[in-house]
Image (cartoon, grey):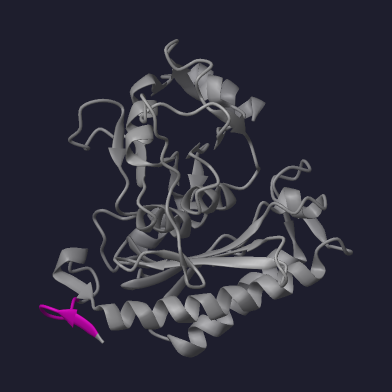
Amino acid sequence: MTVTQDSPSPGDGKNAAETVPDDATLTEIELYAIEVVETAGKLVSERFGGDLDVESKDGNGANPVTDVDRASQALITEMVEKRFPEHMILGEEDAPKDEPAARDFIWVVDPIDGTTNYVNGHPVYAVSIGVLHRGEPVAAAVWTPWPTEGGFEIMHARKGGGAWIGDRKLAVKKPSGDEPHRPKRGWLSTIPGSLRFMFKVDRRLRGNLGEPRTTGSAVYELAMVARGVLQYALTGAVFSWDLAAGTLLVKEAGGIVLTPAGPSDQVVGDWAMLDSFAPKFENTQKTTKEMRALRRVVLVGAPEVVWFVSKYVTRRRYGPVRRRLRRWLH
């Protein structure tokens, strides 16, 4: 059941504060998201290392998609539509020719994040389901390969309910000592390979980024922040399906999520909190299109570390010629 002041109609522009899902609703969604992501994860893992039908979305060998990506998304879609026919799916693969009008509940799906790793037999990838309510993440389930008896783990969360693996509550990694805000040497962090091109890194942070890695999967990186493996993660510009689940996991594990501030954000500095994937949510096709096209950089981790890093990492500003050159190079 969803508690509302009154039922919103398509295009009425009501925001998430005016129609709030109760905890029983979110619990039901969270538990089913776990079931769905486990089923999809089994499908994906059973095909790992085998023969794959691989295509390139860009036509140049980059940005691959496999028959397993599509099968995973189709399976997730079928399961969600059967249980919650009033909800909708926004997935990475096979976007419809005509986007439907956005519904209040949207399951944002990445059937395999880290497909390039997956294709090359590198077991750093994830299956991700993030459920949004009028643009705000409210439930999440992420399946990752893991050296346990079953060969995988599922991290899950709902808004206000904490982040969990089974009955173990997750917490972000919090440095201690004389400078608890500063990234700690010897502790892992992830940064994009294009860090220097995308950002200016102040000299006071150079050499103090922790032990930086690049994994090839934003979903995996955010999940590792939530479970306390990484002290923080800074991503490249990634899509809603790369972020919807992981950002909620991080928040429910005690972390924060920042994104480069836009012109309408009332902040001081270069970063703002990321709370919604559709701040001006309406039940319209425009909202769906904007959510599919949205790309964000995020900086996530323990609050004191994230605020410290954000102080010394600022976006580079490029003119049109440099932007075209960057697109050509990448």
Q: Which residue is drawn at 57% across and 60% down?
A: 92
Q: Can residue 322 be seen in this view?
A: yes
- Would you say 164 lies left or right of 303 here? right
Residue 281: x percent and y percent? 26, 60
Q: In which quarter of the image is the C terminus?
A: top right
Q: Which of 33/172 is in front? A: 172
Is residue 280 highlighted in magenta?
Answer: no
Q: Which of 236/318 is in front? A: 236
The image shows residue 207, relative to residue 230, as above or below, that is above
Q: In which quarter of the image is the N terminus?
A: bottom left
- Would you say 278 lies left or right of 128 here? left
Q: Which residue is drawn at 59% across and 21% down?
A: 325
Q: Residue at x 46, y 50 (%)?
A: 293
Q: Is residue 87 visible?
A: no
Q: Which of 301/131 is in front? A: 301
Q: Which residue is outermost to the right?
A: 51
Q: Which residue is outermost to the top?
A: 203
Residue 181: x percent and y percent? 36, 29
Q: Which residue is drawn at 12% across and 80% down?
A: 6
Q: Which residue is outermost to the front?
A: 177
Occupied quadrant, residue 259: top left
Residue 272: x percent and y percent? 28, 37
- Would you say 22 lies left or right of 327 here? left
Is residue 7 highlighted in magenta?
Answer: yes
Magenta residues (range): 2-8
Residue 186: x percent and y percent? 58, 30
Q: How many marks do you count on the picture?
A: 0
The image shows residue 26, relative to residue 322, as above or below, that is below
